[in-house]
C-alpha cells in the first residue's frame, strides 16, 4: 500500500520540498504513485526547493541542471545559443533563448524536470561508485616502500626495531570523502552528461550540421569554466566507470574518446550511495537578498560595496551592521513612543519588530519589559547582531511574504518601509493588521513627503506618493515617501483607529551622516476584524452592476500566473470535493489541469442571476471575480447556495475577489473610472464580500474565513513603451470598450503602467482575497 495515500497534500508537499538531495526525491517518486501525481502539479516548487538544499547543486552545477532541463524540453536551440551559454562567465544572465529556464514555473509540464531529477539521482550514485572504487584501490594498495601501522612506525623511526615489517595500508576511519572530493566527481559527471545530451539533441532533434556539432567540441569550449571539465579529471572518471561497467562505454564524440556516455548505476559492479556532506562554510554562496540555488544558511559576512552604486535594503544594511545602531538607537522621540506603547500592552504580550535591525532600541525595550519579542529583517547580518544582544526570536525574512507564528499584540515597523514599492507598502500595512489580535497596536516610523528637500522627487499619482533618489549613510538609495495625510488615510483604510502621532527632527550620531531628518511616528489601534475587506470605511449602499467585456477579460486572464504555494491554498480547500461548479471559469487557471482532472468540474464562464442546475448538484461552488457583474447580488448568492449539497460534510462556497491593494483595480479606478460616463469600473471588493458573508450566514454557511491570494498578470518583456501601450489598451478594452474617452484613458494609463513595469519588470500584481464559507456545524 502506498504509505502516502492517507497523508494530507500539504504534508506530502512539505516532505518532498525537504528532501536533502535528488536521490531521495527520485526514490520517493519511484515508490509512491501519490507522490508522483503530486509532482506533476508542484514540480517547479519541489525542484527549486531541493536545488537549494542539495549540497552538490550549488557552485555552478545548478546552471548545468537548468541547461539539462532546457535540452530535455521540447524547445529547439541554435548553435549560437548553446555556445553563448557555455562560453559565458558563470553567474552571468542566460542567453535570451534560455532565459525561460532560469525558473521552472514557465514549463508546460513536469516531463523535462522529472527526467533531470532522475539524472541527478543517477549522477549521485555514479559518483559514490567511483569514489568507493578509488578508496578501495588506496586501501588495497601495497606500497613499493613498506609501511607499518602508526605505533610500529614510530618505533622503527626511533631505531627500536631493526626493520619495518611489510603490511598493506589499512584505513583507520570509516568517513566518506570530504565535500570537495565529492563535488569534483559530481562536477565532471554533470559535464559529461551535458555534452552527451547536447550531442544527441543536436544530431537527432535540432538538426545541426556536422560542422556545428564539431564546433561544440572545440577544446576552448569544452574546457570552459562554465562546464568545468578538466583534462586530468575526465579520463580518471571515465576509466573508473569503464572498469565498473560490464561493457565498454561508447564515446560522446570522436575528438574526445575519454568523454563517454554515462552508464546506468544499476549496471555497475559497485553499487554504492551515501548521504551527501554539507557544503563547507568557505564554499557557501550567501546572498542576503534571497536564497538562490545552492545556498545554505550561515552567518552572513558583510562585503564591501561600491559607494557610488545604488543598493537594495538587504545589501545596504548588511554592510552597515552596528554602525546603524550607533547612528539611530539613541532617539528620544522613538524611545518616548516605545514607552507609551509598552504602557498600553498587556503583560507578556507577543510583539513583532518588522525591520528589527540590531534589535536596539525597540526590540530591546520590549524584551526588557517582559514581552515575548519576535524580529524579522532582510539583512542577515542585522538579524545575527539582534539575536546576540536581545532576548527574542529573530529571523531573516521579507515582510511581504512573512507569516508570524502567532497573533501579535503589537507590531512595530520603524524606518523599514522606505525601500519597498508603493503597492507593497499598502499591502504590508494590511498584512500588519491581519497579524494583530483584536484591539492590537501598530506603530509605524516613517518620514513624510514634506521632509523632501525642495520637494525633490517624482510623484506617483496612482498611489499618491513621492519616489526619490537620495544619498543616505553615504550610499545612493531609492526611497518612498507618503504625505502625513496619506499615511493616516492608509491606516484608516486598513482598519486602524488613529491613537498617537509624533513628528520630530533627528540628527544621527554617525560622524559621516549629519543630515537633519524629519521622523514621523504613528500609533494606530486595530478597529476592524477583517482588514482584507478594506478599504474602510465602506461606501454607502451597494454599488450597481459593473460591466466587463468578456472576450477582453478572457485575454487578460490568459496572462494569469500563480506560484505553487498560492495554488496550494485553493487546492487544499477543494481536496476531497468531487462535484465542483466553477463560476467564472478560472479554476483550471488557478489549479492546473493535473489538479482538476480527478474532479467533475462544471464550468460557467459568465455569472448568471439564475443557475440552470438542480438543487444540491454540487458539493462546492467557486465563483471568481463574479460579484461585480450580476444584477442582483443577493439573488445570485441564493442561487449559488441552492445548488450546493448542504447534506454533504464537504459543502463549501468559495468567493474570490480583488484585494484592497490590487494594482490593476487601483490603476483602473484611479485613472479610468473618473473619465467614464457608463461604467464605474471594479466595485469596492470588500463591500461585496462583506455583503456575501451576511447572506451566507443567513442560510447556515456562517463559518467563514478570509485569506489573501497572490497572483499576477505575467507578460513577455518587450520594450517598456510597447508593453505599456499594449497593457493600457488591454485594460481599457476590459472595462471601458467603446467609451467616448477611451483614447484619453489609454494615454493616461501608459505612464503609471511604465512605472509599475519599472518596479517589477514583466508583470502586474493582481492580489486577490479568498472568502471560504462552510456549514455552521462543520
Image (cartoon, helix red, strand yellow):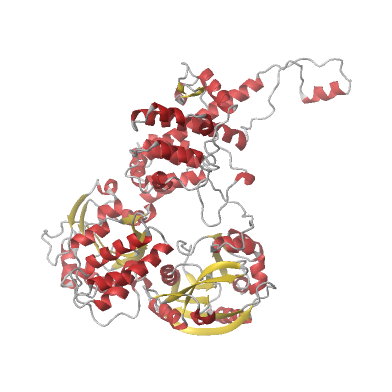
Depth order, front residue of 755/648: 755
Q: Answer with left or right where residue 750 lies relative to residue 637.
A: right
Q: Quadrant of residue 180?
A: top right
Depth order, front residue of 483/269: 483
Q: Pinpoint residue 212: horizontal percent, then vertical percent.
A: 41, 30
User: Does 213 sit above or below residue 740?
Assistant: above
Q: Answer with left or right where residue 233 lies relative to residue 143.
A: left
User: Does 234 sit above or below residue 413?
Assistant: above
**Is residue 133 at least partly visible in the picture?**
yes
User: Does 630 sit above or below residue 132?
Assistant: below
Q: Pinpoint residue 368: horizontal percent, then vertical percent.
A: 63, 72
Screen quadrant of the N terminus: top left
Screen quadrant of the C terminus: bottom left
Q: How many marks?
A: 0
Q: Quadrant of residue 377?
A: bottom right
Q: Residue furthest front?
A: 211
Q: Pinpoint residue 638: horizontal percent, then vertical percent.
A: 17, 68
Residue at the spot 22% in from the left edge and 50% down from the top edge:
578
Q: Answer with left or right where residue 552 lies relative to residue 285.
A: left
**Is residue 646 at least partly visible in the picture?**
no
Q: Pinpoint residue 537: horizontal percent, then vertical percent.
A: 34, 81
Amino acid at each position: 500500500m502506498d504509505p502516502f495515500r492517507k497523508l494530507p497534500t500539504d504534508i506530502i508537499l512539505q516532505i518532498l520540498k525537504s528532501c536533502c538531495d535528488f536521490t531521495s526525491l527520485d526514490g520517493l517518486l519511484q515508490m509512491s504513485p501519490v507522490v508522483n501525481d503530486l509532482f506533476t502539479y508542484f514540480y517547479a516548487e519541489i525542484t527549486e526547493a531541493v536545488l537549494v538544499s542539495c549540497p552538490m547543486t550549488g557552485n555552478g552545477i545548478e546552471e548545468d541542471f537548468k541547461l539539462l532541463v532546457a535540452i530535455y524540453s521540447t524547445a529547439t536551440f541554435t548553435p549560437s545559443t548553446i555556445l553563448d551559454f557555455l562560453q559565458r562567465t558563470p553567474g552571468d544572465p542566460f542567453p535570451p533563448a534560455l532565459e525561460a529556464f532560469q525558473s521552472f514555473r514557465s514549463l508546460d509540464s513536469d516531463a523535462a524536470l522529472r527526467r533531470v531529477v532522475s539524472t541527478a539521482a543517477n549522477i549521485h550514485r555514479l559518483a559514490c561508485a567511483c569514489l568507493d572504487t578509488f578508496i578501495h584501490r588506496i586501501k588495497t594498495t601495497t606500497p613499493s616502500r613498506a609501511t607499518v601501522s602508526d605505533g610500529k612506525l614510530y618505533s622503527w623511526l626511533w631505531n627500536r626495531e631493526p626493520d619495518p615489517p611489510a603490511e598493506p595500508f589499512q584505513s583507520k576511519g570509516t568517513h566518506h570523502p570530504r565535500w570537495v572530493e565529492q563535488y569534483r566527481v559530481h562536477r565532471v559527471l554533470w559535464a559529461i552528461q551535458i555534452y552527451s545530451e547536447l550531442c544527441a539533441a543536436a544530431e537527432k532533434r535540432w538538426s545541426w550540421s556536422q560542422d556545428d556539432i564539431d564546433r561544440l567540441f572545440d577544446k576552448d569550449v569544452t574546457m570552459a569554466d562554465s562546464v568545468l571539465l578538466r583534462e586530468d579529471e575526465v579520463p580518471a572518471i571515465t576509466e573508473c566507470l569503464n572498469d565498473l561497467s560490464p561493457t565498454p562505454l561508447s564515446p560522446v564524440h570522436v575528438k574526445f574518446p575519454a568523454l563517454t556516455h554515462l552508464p546506468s548505476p544499476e549496471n555497475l559492479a559497485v553499487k554504492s550511495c551515501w548521504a551527501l556532506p554539507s557544503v563547507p562554510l568557505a564554499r557557501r554562496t550567501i546572498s542576503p537578498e534571497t536564497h538562490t540555488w545552492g545556498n545554505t544558511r550561515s552567518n552572513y559576512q558583510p562585503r564591501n560595496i561600491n559607494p557610488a552604486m545604488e543598493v537594495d535594503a538587504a545589501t545596504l544594511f548588511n554592510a552597515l551592521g552596528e554602525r546603524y545602531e550607533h547612528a539611530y538607537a539613541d532617539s528620544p522621540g522613538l524611545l518616548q513612543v516605545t514607552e507609551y506603547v509598552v504602557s498600553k500592552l498587556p503583560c507578556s504580550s507577543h510583539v513583532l519588530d518588522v525591520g528589527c535591525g540590531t534589535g536596539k532600541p525597540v526590540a530591546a525595550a520590549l524584551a526588557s519589559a517582559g514581552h515575548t519579542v519576535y524580529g524579522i529583517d532582510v539583512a542577515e547580518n542585522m538579524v545575527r547582531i539582534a539575536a546576540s544582544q536581545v532576548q527574542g526570536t529573530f529571523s531573516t525574512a521579507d515582510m511581504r511574504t512573512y507569516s508570524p507564528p502567532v497573533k501579535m499584540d503589537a507590531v512595530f515597523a520603524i524606518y523599514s518601509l522606505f525601500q519597498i514599492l508603493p503597492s507593497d507598502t499598502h499591502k504590508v500595512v494590511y498584512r500588519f493588521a491581519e497579524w494583530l489580535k483584536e484591539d492590537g497596536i501598530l506603530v509605524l516610523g516613517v518620514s513624510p513627503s514634506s521632509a523632501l528637500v525642495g520637494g525633490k522627487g517624482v510623484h506617483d499619482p496612482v498611489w499618491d506618493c513621492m519616489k526619490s533618489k537620495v544619498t543616505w549613510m553615504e550610499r545612493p538609495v531609492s526611497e518612498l515617501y507618503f504625505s502625513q495625510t496619506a499615511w493616516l488615510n492608509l491606516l484608516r483604510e486598513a482598519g486602524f483607529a488613529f491613537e498617537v502621532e509624533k513628528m520630530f527632527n533627528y540628527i544621527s550620531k554617525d560622524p559621516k551622516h549629519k543630515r537633519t531628518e524629519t521622523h514621523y511616528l504613528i500609533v494606530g489601534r486595530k478597529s476592524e476584524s477583517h482588514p482584507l475587506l478594506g478599504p474602510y470605511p465602506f461606501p454607502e449602499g451597494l454599488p450597481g452592476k459593473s460591466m466587463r467585456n468578456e472576450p477582453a477579460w478572457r485575454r487578460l486572464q490568459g496572462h494569469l500566473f500563480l506560484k505553487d504555494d498560492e495554488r496550494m491554498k485553493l487546492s487544499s480547500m477543494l481536496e476531497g470535493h468531487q462535484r465542483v461548479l466553477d463560476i467564472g471559469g478560472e479554476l483550471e487557471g488557478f489549479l492546473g489541469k493535473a489538479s482538476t482532472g480527478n474532479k467533475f468540474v462544471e464550468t460557467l464562464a459568465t455569472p448568471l442571476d439564475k443557475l440552470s442546475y438542480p438543487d444540491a448538484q454540487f458539493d462546492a461552488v467557486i465563483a471568481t471575480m463574479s460579484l461585480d457583474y450580476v444584477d442582483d447580488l443577493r439573488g445570485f448568492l441564493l442561487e449559488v447556495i441552492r445548488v450546493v449539497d448542504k447534506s454533504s460534510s464537504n459543502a463549501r462556497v468559495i468567493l474570490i475577489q480583488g484585494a484592497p491593494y490590487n494594482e490593476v483595480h487601483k490603476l483602473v479606478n484611479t485613472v479610468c473610472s473618473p473619465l467614464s460616463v457608463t461604467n464605474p469600473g471594479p466595485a469596492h471588493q470588500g463591500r461585496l464580500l462583506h455583503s456575501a458573508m451576511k447572506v451566507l450566514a443567513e442560510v447556515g454557511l456562517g463559518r467563514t474565513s478570509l485569506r489573501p491570494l497572490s497572483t499576477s498578470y505575467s507578460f513577455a518583456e518587450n520594450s517598456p513603451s510597447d508593453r505599456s501601450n499594449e497593457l493600457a489598451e488591454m485594460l481599457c478594452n476590459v472595462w471601458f470598450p467603446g467609451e467616448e474617452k477611451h483614447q484619453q484613458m489609454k494615454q493616461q494609463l501608459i505612464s503609471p503602467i511604465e512605472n509599475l513595469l519599472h518596479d517589477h519588470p514583466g508583470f502586474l500584481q493582481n492580489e486577490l482575497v479568498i472568502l471560504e464559507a462552510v456549514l455552521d456545524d462543520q
